[in-house]
Image: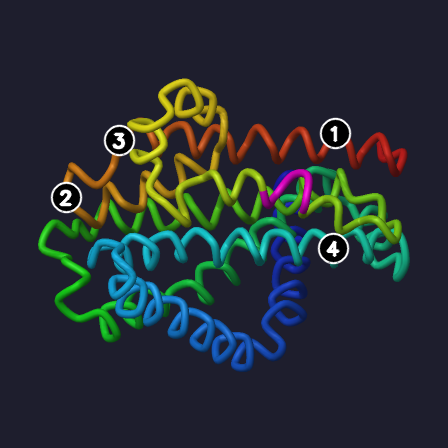
Amino acid sequence: MVRQQLQVFWYLLVADFIVLFKGIGGELIDTCIWISLSVFCNGYVMPQLGTSTKYGALLALGQLVSSGIFLMYHSSSSLISDFEQTKVAAYDFALPVAAWLVFFRRACAITLKALLLSSIILPLAKLILMSRLDLSHFSLPKFLLAFFLVNFFCGLGAIFLASVNDGSPYSSRVWVRFVFPLWFLGGSIFPYGAIVNAFPILGKLLLLNPIVYATEVIKAATLSSEASVIPFSIAALVLFLYAWLIFFVGYYRLKKRFNLV
């Protein structure tokens, strides 16, 4: 029985790859464009206005997280469309596989797409910033783990966002009320350490924000120890637990919503 479920899971996952990776070349070009403009402007233009020359490097690492967050949001909209309009998921739930595996396979497919799209960000940022992106403290094992965890969180997070998206004309509120506040205050635009130093109480409250751990784990794996506030091991563990927590919350919400067994 378990073997049969795993086989069905694999076939469904392959089907998702075919759908999600259609047109991936164009999406990679799109990623290159917005990353290049963002890194160049924040690495060279903003310092002319008084910001630190390190700002471009910090923002480039934040874009490793932002890329996955943006994909997570857009993927959640596609998921809810499959569930409520095209009814593609109705066939999946009729197959001999546990309902949670149907959702998990979607999350895995989104994770792999996020990994591919964001894999070009660091090399591209280094090419643009050159010496302004100091990688002398770069740890490949830590970075690979951090890179996977960030995108794994985004893949599982898409299931949760789908559960709070009702498919109405006001579905954009999911971005405004859930994703944007967490992303904007999560350390992708400005370092979490700056908030801790300037607003200690807010800094403690933001420890509830999973995106803080995503940006901190990336910085801890890439830059010097002074660049991150939360130690690598703690940030990695909390992000991993958050990923599963929001996945199962999203799964149970969708299970109840669609009356799944």
Residue drawn at (31%, 63%) of the image: 46
Q: Is residue 13 magenta?
A: no
Whole-angstrom CA distance, mark 3 to mark 2, is 11 Å
Whole-angstrom CA distance, mark 3 to mark 1, is 34 Å
Q: Is residue 121 above or below residue 4?
A: below
Residue, disc 2: 224
Residue, disc 4: 77
Judged by depth in the image, the label closer to the viewer, 3 or 1, is 3
Residue, disc 1: 252
Determine whether label 4 and label 3 are within 8 Å by CB: no
Report helix, strand or loop for mark 4.
helix
Q: x, y (%) of residue 24?
A: 55, 76
Judged by depth in the image, the label closer to the viewer, 4 or 1, is 4
Apparent side of residue 21 relative to residue 169 in the rendered image (left or right): left
Of the numbered discs 3 and 2, the one sitting upstream in the chain is: 2
Whole-angstrom CA distance, mark 4 to mark 2, is 37 Å
- Mark 3 belongs to which amino acid? Val
- Mark 1 belongs to which amino acid? Tyr
Whole-angstrom CA distance, mark 1 to mark 2, is 40 Å
- Mark 4 belongs to which amino acid? Ser
Q: Nearer the viewer, residue 90 or 50?
A: 50
Determine whether label 4 and label 2 are within 8 Å by CB: no
Residue drawn at (26%, 69%) of the image: 44
The boundaries of the magenta stretch are 176-180
Task: Report the disc number at residue 229.
Answer: 3
Q: x, y (%) of residue 175?
A: 67, 47
Q: x, y (%) of residue 114?
A: 50, 59
Q: Residues within 10 Å of mark 1 (few under 14, many from 20)?
A: some
